[in-house]
Image (tube, rainbow, N blue to C red):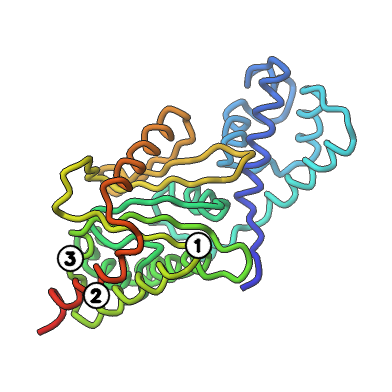
Amino acid sequence: MAARPRPTARRIELGHELRHLRQQAGLTLEDAVKGLTFSETKLQRVETGLQDLRNAGDLRKLLTRYGVTDEDAVDRLVETQRTASRQDWWTPYTMATMAPSMPRFLGVESAAQAIRAYHPTCVLGLLQTERYAQVVHELAKPIEETTTEFIQKSVALRMRRKERLTSSEEPVKLWAILYEPALRYVVGDTDVMREQYEEIADLAGRDNVTVQILPQSVRGYLSLSDFTLLDLGSTLPTTVQVDTAGAGMSLTDKPREVGRFTRMFEALSRSALPSEATPEFLHQLTREILTP
């Protein structure tokens, strides 16, 4: 699969650099926008990658205010801004009922070079088969009052996100920890679960994917909430995503929070079985749960 353009990644890069330049110049958000045609709220959203700065003229004025005079540096940032203004690959999958923070998460995930994720209640989305994902959404339909169109788009989006694991160009690195009860939770029928176990084992055999299983009998640290750590490379801060009450989503790159969840992941990894044990563990589950 050809490498995809990643506008949100460019927005994050541009925003991070603009924030650094502003702080280096000793300016507040209010100082930076004085006399310009946009507000400090918009600049704050630009700096956090939530919004793109569509007008190259506005960007050039900001850079002048920040003392950036090198034409090569200005041209590079203008080109980044131009790329950031394009539509993201996942735009056709968006819908009114999508959580407000989901587009931001999709953009950060698409920019990630490595992902570490933990899930205690069901199979991690990036490891799900299409049939498993379909059943999970169908089970939630009467509770969440979602539509058939929402389910179709959500499942298609999940499968598209998963393509990065098997891409021939720069596949993302995934390190997933699954709590044993998540694997014992039977979604659909035995065929769905058998296919799902086989898919996890197959993906875990790839060089860029590591899957550990945290036994139900664990005596060490246990988190009851799922979370994802997204490594954006050496020039951008790591971001953590956490699901919150009411099917919401929290996304932050604050060092304190990233550090806390990094320690959580490391503790869970120490308590989990080694990745080499995953295929046999899944085979044992198949015998226990799915064999008549």
Disc 3 + disc 1, Cβ < 8 Å: no
Amino acid at circle 3: Arg
Residue ID at (38%, 40%): 250
Residue ID at (19%, 80%): 190
Q: Tell me the tag on residue 208.
A: 1
- The x, y position of residue 25, in whole percent, is 73, 18
> Camera-side residue: 113 or 101?
113
Q: Is residue 228 left or right of residue 19?
A: left
Crowding around mark 2 (Cα neighbors within 10 Å: few <14, some 14 to 19, many 20+) is some
Decide which of tag 2 and tag 3 comes sooner along the chain.
Answer: 3
> Camera-side residue: 187 or 81?
187
Amino acid at circle 1: Asn
Residue picked out by circle 2: 283
Cα–Cα gap, marks 3 and 1: 25 Å
Decide which of tag 1 and tag 2 comes sooner along the chain.
Answer: 1
Crowding around mark 1 (Cα neighbors within 10 Å: few <14, some 14 to 19, many 20+) is some
Residue picked out by circle 3: 184
Q: Is residue 132 left or right of residue 251?
A: left
Disc 1 + disc 2, Cβ < 8 Å: no
The quadrant holding residue 14 is top right
Residue ID at (39%, 69%): 155
Amino acid at circle 2: His
Decide which of tag 3 and tag 1 comes sooner along the chain.
Answer: 3
- The x, y position of residue 147, in whole percent, is 31, 67
Q: Secondary structure at mark 2?
A: helix
